[in-house]
């Protein structure tokens, strides 16, 4: 069974179990928004090279595209991160300094749930050649679609294209992070009615929730089927395994809890 791991804090673990949901954070409120800069830079450079080509096909398309690009700061895109490795030092350090948990999910079930709620699950791309190729492919598709349509359909075509752009940009990352083997859950949302807000000690963070659900499959809770096990972070006290086991029982999740194999002490 393919597994995806989600690294989170103690509060994050309790929140996921309590809500039976995964939280996609508004990209404008991520701790480090620079990780999306590579994708936007590739998009911007490719657009400059192909602007004349697109304009020759459809001048209105240029207005739409540039309107979307100028409004990037107001784009509602949401992401949640997973890794195919549930116990690597770089992830523990980067997310919670080893003070947290790694939740193992059944990838196929998460994929099925995501498809039913307009979320997309995609591997992050670390190779710079792939970055340029996939963005160039997006422009190839746009030009092809514009050539086959009339002026009345330019707006919906560019809108659908821009939605694809948002998803692709969200999975482009610098090669130096390739050890993370990241997979991202992504959604773009144009209606604020489903957006929720959580709080940290320092700020409020909008998020979109993908419900794992309280429905049953074969007599078992879907969330219980999705969560395969939990790993206790290497900086946590040994008694946290005991606490995590009882937390899972409290929320009626049947899954084992393991300790990290990494000999790491947080500074």
Image (tube, rainbow, N blue to C red):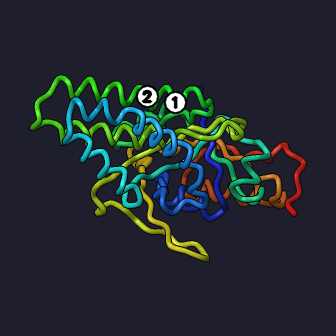
| 2 left or right of 198 in image | right
Q: Residue at x 62, y 33 (%)?
A: 126
**Element class at badge 2:** helix
Residue 228 bears which disc, if any?
A: none
| 35 left or right of 45 in image | right
Residue 136 bears which disc, if any?
A: 2
Q: Position of residue 198 (x, y in %)?
A: 49, 69
Question: Camera-side residue: 238 or 60?
Answer: 60
Q: Residue at x 50, y 34 (%)?
A: 122
Q: Position of residue 210 (x, y in %)?
A: 42, 50
Question: Camera-side residue: 217 or 88?
Answer: 88
- Is residue 228 in view? no
Q: Position of residue 78 (x, y in %)?
A: 44, 52
Distance in Å between CA atoms under marks 1 and 2? 6 Å
Q: Quadrant of residue 159?
A: top left
Q: Mark 1 highlights which residue?
A: 132
Tag 1–tag 2 contact (CB < 8 Å): yes
| 86 left or right of 32 in image | right
Q: Quadrant of residue 218?
A: top left
Q: Is residue 250 above or below residue 52?
A: below
């Amino acid at each position: 069974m393919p597994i995806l791991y989600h690294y989170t804090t103690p509060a994050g673990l309790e929140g996921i179990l309590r809500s039976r949901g995964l939280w996609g954070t508004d990209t404008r409120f991520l701790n480090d928004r620079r990780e999306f800069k590579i994708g936007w830079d590739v998009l911007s450079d490719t657009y400059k090279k192909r602007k004349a080509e697109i304009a020759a096909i459809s001048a209105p398309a240029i207005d739409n595209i540039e309107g979307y690009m100028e409004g990037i700061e107001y784009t509602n895109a949401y992401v949640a991160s997973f890794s195919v490795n549930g116990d690597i030092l770089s992830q523990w350090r980067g997310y919670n300094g080893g003070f947290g948990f790694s939740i193992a999910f059944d990838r196929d079930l998460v994929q099925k749930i995501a498809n039913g709620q307009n979320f997309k699950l995609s591997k992050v791309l670390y190779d710079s050649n792939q970055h340029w190729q996939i963005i160039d492919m997006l422009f190839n598709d746009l030009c092809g679609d514009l050539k086959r349509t009339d002026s009345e359909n330019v707006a919906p075509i560019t809108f659908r294209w821009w939605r694809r752009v948002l998803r692709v940009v969200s999975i482009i990352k610098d090669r130096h992070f390739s050890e993370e083997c990241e997979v991202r859950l992504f959604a773009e949302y144009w209606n604020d009615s489903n957006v929720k807000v959580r709080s940290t000690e320092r700020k409020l963070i909008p998020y979109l929730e993908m419900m794992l659900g309280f429905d049953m499959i074969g007599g078992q809770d879907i969330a219980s089927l999705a969560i395969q096990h939990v790993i206790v972070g290497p900086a946590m006290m040994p008694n946290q395994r005991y606490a995590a086991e009882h937390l899972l029982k409290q929320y009626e999740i049947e899954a084992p809890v393991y300790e990290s194999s990494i000999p790491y002490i947080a500074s």
